[in-house]
């Protein structure tokens, strides 16, 4: 019986009752063998607010021709969709574990173009990033002026367009690099209180930076937004493919424009204090398919995306 042609509800029951998964360590990846496929996950287990790189391939065993010919369209994790890219011998992609995810085991669904799915269990570690209390001007904390509300509404529309324009393939071939190496004045994921009122958790890290410091791109990609926003100030967003975006906020100058192809390390602007800030700094963020993840952790974990894990032991896994 070809599992990939089974109705989804039947497949879920089959997986839960009959399918045996085996997991082993394979270098930096954890390997799971299930349903005629070999899955590679790293880092394992991920924490809330962290990305998980996924690669998989069909096993070269007799009787698995249908699986080898199957095409996959993407992944679903915690009701969010993430793209997949076909690579030599299989597929790769990255999912993001949202902040606030409780510790436990969740299903990662790999969706085929025929409408069927494979389910892989992913164990998530809970992580508390702490809290931070800041004081800003009242109009920045809770905007009330009609012109500001209109600007915020337009900003949301511009951001939606930018985040819906990712390339279906990875655009960088080297590991990400942090844009600055100065002291961090605010870390990722902290629960924020502005003027005593709770706001969204901090979606990136803040580097100490005087006004006018050149800001390099963390990796190669394409500029999808370069304009001043109400909260973010002057911001540059770069698409790196597979719905991976880096954000550079509160700039004093923008030195690129939408559509520009950016090289790793290319200067895209200068640090500043525009938008909702308490002082000059650079906010650096990483957003994957609508989910903010710890940018510095993703900088470190980006190396997993540059490997074909089933070939890496032969020295051929680097893309």
Image: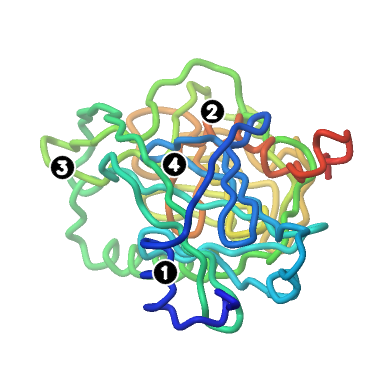
Q: In the image, which is nearer the foreground, mark 3 or mark 1?
A: 1
Q: In the image, which is nearer the foreground, mark 3 or mark 2?
A: 3
- Going from the N terminus, do you reach mark 2 or mark 1 first? 1
The disc label shown at residue 14, or none? 1
Cα–Cα gap, marks 2 and 4: 10 Å
Secondary structure beneath dot 1 equals helix
Q: Is residue 202 left or right of residue 179?
A: left
Farthest-out residue, left: 196
Mark 3 = which residue? Answer: 198
The disc label shown at residue 274, or none? 4
Residue 159 seen by the camera: no
Cα–Cα gap, marks 3 and 1: 44 Å
Mark 2 = which residue? Answer: 211
Given contact means CB atoms under 8 Å apart, are the residues at marks 4 and 1 in contact?
no
- Going from the N terminus, do you reach mark 4 or mark 1 first? 1
Q: In the image, which is nearer the foreground, mark 4 or mark 3?
A: 3
Cα–Cα gap, marks 2 and 1: 59 Å
Secondary structure beneath dot 4 equals loop
Q: Residues within 10 Å of mark 1 (few under 14, many from 20)?
A: few
């Amino acid at each position: 019986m070809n599992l990939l042609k089974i109705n989804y509800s039947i497949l879920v029951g089959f997986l839960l009752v009959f399918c045996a998964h085996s997991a082993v360590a394979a270098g930096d990846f954890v390997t799971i063998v299930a349903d005629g496929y070999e899955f590679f996950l790293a880092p394992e287990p991920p924490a809330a607010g962290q990305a998980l790189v996924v690669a998989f391939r069909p096993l070269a065993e007799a009787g698995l021709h249908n699986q080898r010919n199957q095409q996959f369209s993407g992944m679903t994790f915690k009701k969010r969709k993430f793209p997949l890219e076909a690579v030599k011998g299989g597929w790769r992609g990255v999912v993001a574990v949202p902040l606030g995810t409780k510790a436990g085991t969740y299903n990662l669904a790999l969706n085929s173009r025929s409408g069927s799915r494979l389910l892989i269990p992913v164990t998530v570690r809970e992580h508390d990033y702490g809290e931070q209390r800041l004081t800003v001007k009242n109009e920045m904390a809770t905007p009330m002026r009609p012109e500001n509300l209109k600007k915020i509404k337009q900003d949301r529309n511009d951001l939606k367009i930018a985040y819906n324009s990712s390339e279906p393939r990875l655009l960088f071939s080297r590991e990400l690099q942090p844009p600055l190496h100065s002291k961090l004045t605010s870390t990722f994921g902290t629960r924020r209180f502005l003027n005593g009122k709770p706001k969204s958790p901090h979606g990136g890290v803040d580097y100490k930076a005087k006004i006018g410091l050149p800001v390099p791109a963390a990796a190669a990609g394409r500029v999808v937004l370069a304009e001043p926003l109400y909260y973010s100030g002057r911001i540059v967003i770069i698409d790196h493919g597979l719905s991976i975006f880096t954000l550079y906020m509160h700039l004093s100058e923008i030195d690129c424009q939408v559509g520009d192809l950016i090289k790793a390390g290319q200067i895209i602007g200068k640090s500043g204090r525009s938008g909702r800030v308490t002082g000059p700094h650079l906010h650096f963020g990483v957003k994957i398919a609508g989910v903010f993840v710890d940018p510095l952790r993703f900088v470190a974990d980006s190396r997993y995306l540059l490997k074909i894990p089933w070939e890496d032991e032969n020295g051929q896994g680097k893309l």
